[in-house]
Amino acid sequence: MSGREVFCISRLRINTFVTEQKITVPELDDTDLEATQVFLLNEAKTNALAVCRVFKEDGKWLLGRVAVDKAARGQQLGSKMMKTVHDYLREQGVKQLYCHAQMQAKPFYDQLGYETVGDIFEEAGVKHVMMVKEL
């Protein structure tokens, strides 16, 4: 990734998770060094419109840091990005994709075919639930 792409992705994630949601744990972590970053930039390549990351941990594929720019919400960019991720992973032979879904985002994952696995838990001060999608 270029420096510009890293900047755009970081800015959207910080705007969403730190500024908007007030999460105080470090936004960038060591997982970012290994994860595949998925993103859509605006035409001028000055802002990320949608981002997520996928990575393998303990034999499972995980999805995380899913965010859509506040001004771009309602345009189905998140759903389109997720379907592209699902198609790509399916082509790579991945059978399941897990995520720690924030409870407020659970309906988004529900409509994409994710199913709840287990109980609600807290992560970074936010209620989450583990979800999985069969690819």
Image (cartoon, rainbow, N blue to C red):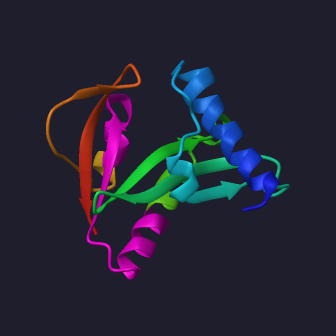
User: On the rendered structure, is 114 left or right of 28?
Assistant: left
As for residue 76 lying within the magenta part, the answer is no
Instruction: Examine the rendering and report whether any part of residue 35 can be seen.
Output: no
Q: Is residue 102 magenta?
A: yes
Q: Quadrant of the N terminus?
A: bottom right
Using the rendered image of the protein, determine whether residue 18 is visible from the camera's viewpoint. yes
The quarter of the displayed image where residue 124 is located: top left
Q: How many marks?
A: 0
Find residue 71 and report its horizontal and vertical position in percent.
67, 36
The answer to whether 40 appears left or right of 24 in the picture is right
Is 96 drawn above or below residue 98 in the view shown? below
Q: Position of residue 49 (x, y in %)?
A: 66, 48
Which image quadrant for residue 26?
top right
- Relative to 91, does residue 111 appear above or below in the rendering? above
Q: Residue at x 49, y 45 (%)?
A: 66
Residue displayed at 58% across by 50% down? 51
Is 1 rendered above or below residue 98? below
Q: Residue at x 32, y 73 (%)?
A: 94
Q: Position of residue 24 (x, y in %)?
A: 53, 20
- Which of the image's four quarters has the C terminus? bottom left
Task: Identify the residue shown where x is 38% and y is 36%.
Answer: 105
Q: Point out the residue furthest to the left here.
A: 118
Task: Say left or right for 5 vs 34.
Answer: right
Region of the chain picked out in magenta, as a range: 83-109
